Image: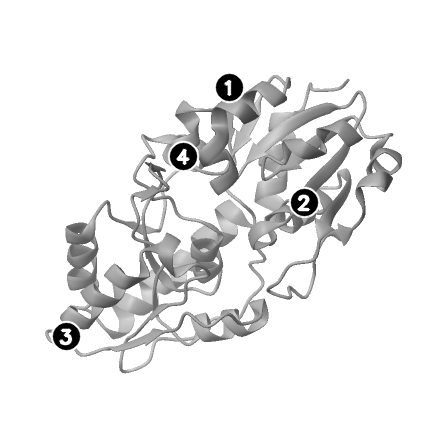
Amino acid sequence: MRIGLLCSSDWANFQWGIYKSLQSVGADVIAYKLDRHIFGYDEQCNVTTPNRINELFKDRDVVLMIHSDWELLEYLDNQIIINFATGTKYRQNSELINTKFKAPITIIALPEFQTLAPNPKYLVGAIDVDRPFKEVGSRLVLGHFPSNPSVKGTDDIIRIVRDLQRLHDFDFEISTDRVSHAENLDRVNKCDIYIELMASHQGGKPYGSFGISALEAASLGKIVLTQSINDNGIYFNSYGASMLNLYNNEQGLIKQLNGLLQYKGDYIQGQMISTKEWAIKNHSFKSTGNKLIEYLNGLQR
């Protein structure tokens, strides 16, 4: 099977992770996008222009349209074209987008899409797990570095953590500064616990689902606190148990933090090691590539 990956802007370098996943399991795959990423990832998918898409993808059996970029459908011919729904675009426009794709499955990266997508197949994004691991220090460090503070619920997270600093002895590293991807990984790696998200809705639509930043923190061995409000068992059924520390609301985040902040040393270190092992087992390039190939088998044109 010859596979193509295509998008306009590759948010969170998501498509590149899927590309590396398919490469890691020996798939015949190409990947292109229209714009380079503002965060300056060291490795990104190749950039092309719309008038070259047809020529580049003409021999592909299946094309995954990453980030639901249905506007690019007109540049493709008779391939099986699958919507890979990853975030805001599909969340806000699912009914329209569903009418644009005729493939037998929809691949979804977020659990709230399981009630929106025709025949959904759940696939969390892939990450590079070959990253350094920092041992826990004598004083716990919590971190929060949102790519989009308004989407991640940053104001509420800051308020909650600042209140808890009156009760517990820990440091809190917070920054909304936009930095390169490499710089962001460096600042995340200085932490022991990473808080990703507290937002139940986005633009009036159900949200509260962990993303690539949670997986990247896990790949560094951070204890990750985040949300998966609309899961309804889809993660466990697809991957098994998760090492993410999940909560639905403010009270849940406070409870999770109060529990973790009772511990130091060996317990925290053990949780960090287990989190990294979980990221490797479930969300490495190879594990993701194998799962995606299972979904695509039998979809030859």
**Residue with the most extreme left position:** 167
Residue lying farthest to the right in this orientation: 55
- For the question of whether residue 85 can be seen, the reply is yes
Applied colour scheme: one colour
Q: Which mark is residue 118?
A: 1
The residue indicated by pointer 4 is: 111
Q: Distance between the residues labelled 2 and 1?
A: 23 Å
Residue shown at the point (73%, 45%) measured from the top left: 23
Q: Is label 2 or label 1 in front? A: 2
> The residue under label 1 is which amino acid type?
Pro
Q: Is mark 4 on a helix, strand or loop?
A: helix
Q: How far apart are marks 2 and 3 (CA)?
A: 45 Å
Which class describes the residues within 10 Å of circle 4: few (<14), some (14-19), or many (20+)?
Answer: many
Q: Return the x and y of residue 193 as percentages of the image width and height.
A: 33, 66
Mark-to-mark CA distance, 1 and 3: 47 Å
Q: Tag 3: residue type?
A: His
Q: Which residue is drawn at 80% across and 41% down?
A: 50
Residue that badge 3 annotates: 168
- Locate residue 222 relative to residue 167 in the image: left or right: right
Closer to the camera in the image, 122 or 236: 122
Q: Which of marks 2 and 1 is nearer the N terminus?
A: 2
Say the numbered circle drawn on residue 8. 2
Q: Which of the image's four quarters has the N terminus?
A: top right
Q: Which residue is drawn at 77% across and 17% down?
A: 301
- Please report whichever mark, 1 or 3, sits nearer to the chain's N-terminal start: 1
